[in-house]
Image (cartoon, rainbow, N blue to C red):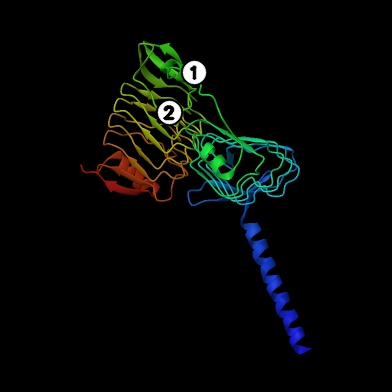
């Protein structure tokens, strides 16, 4: 009898500890609207659970300003209500059993940047009759789909070989008729002003953007206000020689921007120009610049290295507000940039006299 009592007590303790562990894990998740999520080591969002009750679901590209890059394990598993899901273009990974047993799911569009679909991601999705696999997908795990799901893809897609290996239906999409690469005029909206081009909006689809020196025979001189604002899909920008100004808010909320190359001809960076470019790590200010706009790099949370010359004289006190805690200013000794770094408590590294 005593052994039985001890066994029950021990089992109860184990159960309580398990519940504490589960609750603790749940509490560790962040919640934004209908979504629970965690952050990876890069500060990007991994969706851990859909908490809503909608049948047609749309997941935005960010949760609390964190770019969504993964659908976590079993994030939608067992949801018998959802019929369609729209995923964000920022998504790269769909984890194991993410949509398992979503028996009413009829439509889901995989965005063009998805790279990995893990084991069992769509197993049990019996209403999902067709699924297009983008060219970007390089890995598909075992038992990802119901045998009745027909995969589609182009000649370069992994879909064909996977479907053949799994005995699934497959439809190869017809190759589109050859088209010319979009010209600069098609990638940008712009205006001609004072003999030069002011880019008013980027409408292209590239992740790496190299802006030409000329458009329609005129030199590119200005990146206008909000020209790239909220283009979270843009990761790298190379600006042309001859550019003289980046107007205020030009790259605001470009949360995917990791690298930008500023030309030697640049003279002006306006207010809030790179506000909330949270993945920007390093910036080299051209030697010819003498002033920076107020809050130009505010909320660039990962910005750690800023290089400036001795010619830089005006740096507003809030230019790098809410940047990385280990922000380092690289500039000549005795420069205004050194004084600014010491005044603000930033690290300083001398680049010489």
Relative image position of residue 183 (x, y in whole percent): 42, 17
Q: CA distance from mark 2 to mark 1?
A: 43 Å
Residue drawn 68% across and 74% down?
14
List the residue tagged with mark 2.
270
Pointer 2 or 1: first along the chain: 1
Q: Secondary structure at mark 1?
A: loop
Q: Secondary structure at mark 2?
A: loop
Q: Is residue 97 among the parts visible in the rendering?
A: yes
In-image side of 278 versus 313 (left or right): right
Label 1 environment density (alpha carbons within 10 Å; few <14, some 14–19, many ≥20): few
The numbered mark at residue 177 is 1
Quadrant containing the N terminus in the rendered view:
bottom right
- The residue furthest left is 353
Relative image position of residue 288 (x, y in whole percent): 28, 29
Q: Quadrant of residue 285?
A: top left
Relative image position of residue 58 (x, y in whole percent): 66, 36
- The residue furthest right is 1
**Foreground mark, 2 or 1?**
1
Judge whether 38 appears above or below 137 on screen: below
Judge whether 235 appears above or below 191 on screen: below
Judge whether 174 appears above or below 66 on screen: above
């Amino acid at each position: 009898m005593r052994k039985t009592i001890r066994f029950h007590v021990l089992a109860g303790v184990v159960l309580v500890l398990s519940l504490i562990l589960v609750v603790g894990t749940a509490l560790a998740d962040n919640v934004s609207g209908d979504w629970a999520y965690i952050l990876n080591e890069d500060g990007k969002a991994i969706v851990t659970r859909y908490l809503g009750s909608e049948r047609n679901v749309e997941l935005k590209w960010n949760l609390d300003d964190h770019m969504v890059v993964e659908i976590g394990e079993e994030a939608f598993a067992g949801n018998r209500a959802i019929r369609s899901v729209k995923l964000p273009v920022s998504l790269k990974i769909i984890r194991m059993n993410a949509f398992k047993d979503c028996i009413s799911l009829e439509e889901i569009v995989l965005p063009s940047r998805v790279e990995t679909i893990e084991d069992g991601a769509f197993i049990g999705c019996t209403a999902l009759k067709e699924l297009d696999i983008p060219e970007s997908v390089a890995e598909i795990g075992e038992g990802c789909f119901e045998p009745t799901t027909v995969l589609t893809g182009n000649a370069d897609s992994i879909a064909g070989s996977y479907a053949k290996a799994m005995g699934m239906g497959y439809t190869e999409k017809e190759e589109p008729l050859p088209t010319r690469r979009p010209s600069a005029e098609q990638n940008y909206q712009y205006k001609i002003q004072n003999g030069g081009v002011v880019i008013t909006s980027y409408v292209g689809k590239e992740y790496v953007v190299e802006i030409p020196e000329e458009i329609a025979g005129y030199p590119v001189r200005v990146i206008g206000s909000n020209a790239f604002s909220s283009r979270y899909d843009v990761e790298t920008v190379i600006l042309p020689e001859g550019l003289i100004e980046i107007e205020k808010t030009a790259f605001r909320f470009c949360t995917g921007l990791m690298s930008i190359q500023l030309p030697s001809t640049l003279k002006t960076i306006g207010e809030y120009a790179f506000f909330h470019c949270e993945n920007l790590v390093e910036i080299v200010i051209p030697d010819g610049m003498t002033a920076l706009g107020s809050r130009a790099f505010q909320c660039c949370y990962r910005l750690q290295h800023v290089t400036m010359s001795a010619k830089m004289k005006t740096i507003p006190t809030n230019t790098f507000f809410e940047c990385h805690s280990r922000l380092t200013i690289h500039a000549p000794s005795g420069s205004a940039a050194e004084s600014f770094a010491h005044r603000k408590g930033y690290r300083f590294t001398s680049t010489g006299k």
